[in-house]
């Protein structure tokens, strides 16, 4: 094996298992918290998913406030408002409860608390000067992996472009990963978030920045998600939810310390323009982009097919890789991911602009096969017309 030099470190400590959410107060106390800001969207709060965290904080005698101005595809304006609220309240520890939007918003707030200036000033690769305000991340979905990733994706409301704070110093200090949090998740959210996690794993495994450590995480994540997503959507047992929480977190480690590729580049461009839910955008483009990438590394795409449950015995590599793509599409269909044409507001006249925005994405160079706006446009049209 020819291998270039690489480094691998995890700044986030993971606590996994049923009931670990009840340790939030102890973890905040260990971080020296005098006042916590709980970052969660209104839906998560209404569903009662912050109750255990609040009780845990009260038990430890820790004062807290709640910031609930969280939206899908989080906006810079809400991060700024959260920062101002945290300063006013004298917050010294953040606890994010929810999906990627809550966790990314909290990371951005933590960045502003320790660095000042604007969100745009800190978007880029390893620009932070110090660690952000201590953050405890508690996922309520199995998709983004944001509890263990070193970045936050924030939408610039002026340009409608997604910006990325990409720095290990932005990572959560602790991730409390409790599969019980998934038990009441609506099936359509479980489905889109689950395929988002699958996309993370597939792209982490095939991208140009993959390394042996991330490869190992990625392949295991693909297998876990393939085995558990259908059951988690249709019959959310604790076993299925445990498998999905593991798959999502492990996929988060995989892509957080390698990169993603063309699926995310198109999906983020689509989300920036139409506010399409991130997981839905990933699921729509995953099979088509994966098919496009097959010639870049046949062996890795055969590995993906195996992880997707395909018996590749006696198959040519090209055929085996394509069966893997078909298995992805079938999984998307089985969990009822909508087709692109069914999404609200999609306008074919925008496709060229979306393709150009996709090419400009910071992860385009990480796609395993060279891809430009021309190829992005062909893929977008193919998916829309398919």
Image: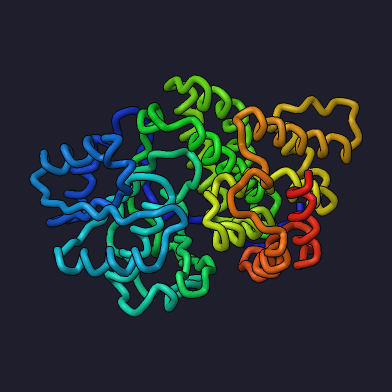
Please say which color scheme the image uses: rainbow
Judge whether 361 appears above or below 23 on screen: below
Report the residue at 45% width, 20% height from top: 237
The foreground one among 94 and 172 is 94
Q: Quadrant of residue 108?
A: bottom left
Taking the image as shown, residue 79 lies to the left or right of residue 165, namely left
Residue 281 location, x and y as percent? 60, 49
Residue 85 location, x and y as percent? 21, 65
The foreground one among 102 and 275 is 275
Q: Quadrant of residue 266?
A: bottom right
Residue 56 location, x and y as percent? 17, 39
Judge whether 80 appears above or below 381 on screen: below
Residue 291 location, x and y as percent? 79, 46
Report the residue at 76% width, 38% height from top: 325
Quadrant of the image containing the C terminus: top right
Report the residue at 52% width, 41% height from top: 193
Taking the image as shown, residue 163 lies to the left or right of residue 107, namely right
Residue 281 appears in the picture as rendered: yes
Taking the image as shown, residue 9 lies to the left or right of residue 317, namely left
Residue 246 appears in the picture as rendered: no
Report the residue at 40% width, 68% height from top: 76
Determine the residue located farthest toward the left in the rendered image. Answer: 61
Q: How many marks?
A: 0
């Amino acid at each position: 094996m020819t291998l270039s030099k690489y480094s691998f470190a995890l700044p986030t400590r993971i606590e996994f298992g049923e009931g670990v959410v009840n340790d939030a107060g102890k973890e905040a106390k260990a971080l020296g918290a005098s006042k916590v800001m709980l970052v969660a969207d209104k839906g998560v709060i209404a569903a009662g998913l912050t109750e255990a965290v609040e009780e845990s904080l009260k038990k430890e005698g820790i004062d807290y406030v709640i910031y609930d101005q969280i939206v899908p595809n989080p906006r810079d304006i809400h991060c700024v408002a959260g920062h101002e609220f945290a300063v006013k309240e004298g917050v010294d520890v953040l606890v994010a409860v929810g999906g990627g939007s809550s966790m990314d918003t909290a990371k951005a707030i933590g960045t502003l608390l320790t660095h000042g200036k604007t969100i745009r000033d800190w978007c880029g690769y390893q620009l932070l000067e110090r660690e952000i305000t201590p953050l405890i991340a508690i996922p309520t979905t199995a998709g983004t992996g944001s509890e263990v990733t070193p970045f936050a994706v924030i939408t610039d409301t002026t340009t409608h472009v997604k910006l990325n704070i990409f720095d290990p110093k932005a990572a959560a200090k602790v991730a409390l990963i409790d599969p019980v949090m998934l038990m009441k998740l609506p099936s359509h959210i479980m489905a889109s978030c689950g395929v988002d996690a699958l996309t993370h794993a597939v792209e982490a495994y095939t991208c140009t920045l993959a390394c042996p450590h991330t490869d190992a995480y990625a392949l295991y994540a693909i297998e876990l998600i393939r085995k558990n997503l259908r059951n988690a959507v249709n019959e959310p047992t604790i076993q299925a939810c445990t498998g999905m929480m593991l798959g999502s977190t492990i996929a988060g480690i995989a892509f957080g310390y390698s990169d993603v590729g063309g699926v995310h580049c198109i999906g983020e461009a689509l989300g920036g323009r139409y506010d399409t839910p991130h997981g839905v955008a990933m699921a729509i483009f995953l099979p088509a982009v994966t098919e496009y990438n097959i010639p870049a590394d046949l062996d890795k795409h055969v590995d993906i097919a195996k992880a997707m449950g395909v018996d590749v015995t006696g198959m040519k590599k090209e055929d085996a890789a394509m069966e893997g793509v078909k298995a992805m599409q079938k999984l998307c269909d089985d969990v009822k991911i909508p087709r692109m044409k069914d999404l609200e507001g999609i306008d074919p006249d925008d496709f060229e602009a979306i393709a150009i925005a996709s090419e400009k994405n910071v992860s385009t160079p990480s796609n395993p096969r060279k891809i430009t706006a021309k190829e992005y446009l062909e893929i977008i049209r193919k998916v829309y017309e398919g």
